[in-house]
Image (tube, rainbow, N blue to C red):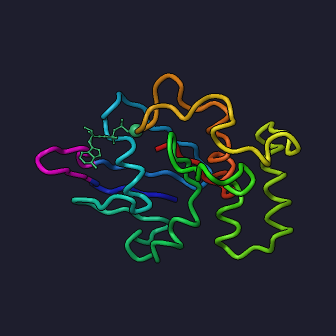
């Protein structure tokens, strides 16, 4: 369960997120919908502490996100970065296998999981595993994410990385 209690984020004079309250039960799908600049990305980034909050509390299973080791917090949270986040000089397989490797999985297990995830994404391993991000169709979209040209196949390795865990966020 993820809970946000009166969470705010201010950049200088600008209030990007204003006292948001939200409870997301385990297994529940929650979608933040809003216009560009409305504070969706900022809200998500505060959950895994990519951004500090100016006020409020964020709890995961009743524990403040501040109480977690920040590396563990992020490793345990599937997170798709739209537009950035893939290493351009790494193959699709290596990009997808990043987190299992960081978690110390053996090479064979990582490789098997990468192949399962590629299959899940409809990407034939023989065709895609050895490709580089720039060789995928779809483009990475404008910096900051969203808008025309975002997503496509180039988004999939990041998706694969995220669905390795159960959660999946588009910041
Ligand atoms: N690092 C930052 N520094 C200053 N302002 C920021 C920063 N990140 C986001 N903002 C501002 O905060 C507001 C919310 O942005 P954002 O969370 O990216 O919105 P959304 O994801 O809903 O499009 C915007 O006005 C944006 O310009
Ligand atoms: Mg956004």
88 w.r.t. 83: above or below = below
* Residue 107 magenta-highlighted: no
Q: Position of residue 131 (x, y in %)?
A: 75, 44
Q: Determine whether, in the image, residue 171 is placed left or right of residue 12.
A: right
Quadrant assignment, res 50: bottom left
* Residue 17 magenta-highlighted: yes
Q: Position of residue 93 (x, y in %)?
A: 75, 53
61 w.r.t. 37: above or below = below
Q: Residue furthest left?
A: 13
Q: Residue at x 39, y 44 (%)?
A: 41
- In depth, the one of 149 and 67 nearer the eye is 149
Q: Position of residue 125 (x, y in %)?
A: 85, 45
Q: Position of residue 7 (x, y in %)?
A: 28, 54
Q: Residue at x 65, y 64 (%)?
A: 99
Which segment did they paint magenta? 8-19
Quadrant assignment, res 119: top right
Q: Determine whether, in the image, residue 129 is placed left or right of residue 33.
A: right
């Amino acid at each position: 369960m993820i809970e946000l209690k009166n969470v705010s984020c201010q950049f200088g004079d600008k209030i990007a997120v204003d006292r948001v309250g939200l409870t997301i039960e385990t297994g529940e799908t929650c979608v933040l919908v809003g216009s560009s600049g409305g504070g969706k990305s900022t809200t998500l980034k505060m959950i895994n502490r990519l951004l500090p909050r100016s006020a409020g509390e964020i709890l995961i299973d009743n524990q403040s996100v501040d109480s977690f080791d920040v590396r563990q917090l992020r490793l345990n949270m599937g997170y798709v970065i739209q537009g950035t986040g893939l290493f351009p000089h790494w193959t699709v397989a290596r990009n997808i296998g990043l987190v299992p490797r960081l978690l110390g999985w053996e090479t064979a297990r990582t490789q098997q999981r990468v192949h399962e995830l590629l299959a899940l994404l409809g990407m034939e391993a023989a065709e895609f595993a050895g490709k580089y991000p720039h060789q995928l169709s779809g483009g990475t979209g404008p910096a900051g994410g969203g808008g025309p040209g975002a997503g496509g196949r180039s988004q999939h390795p990041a998706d694969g990385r995220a669905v390795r865990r159960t959660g999946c966020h588009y910041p």
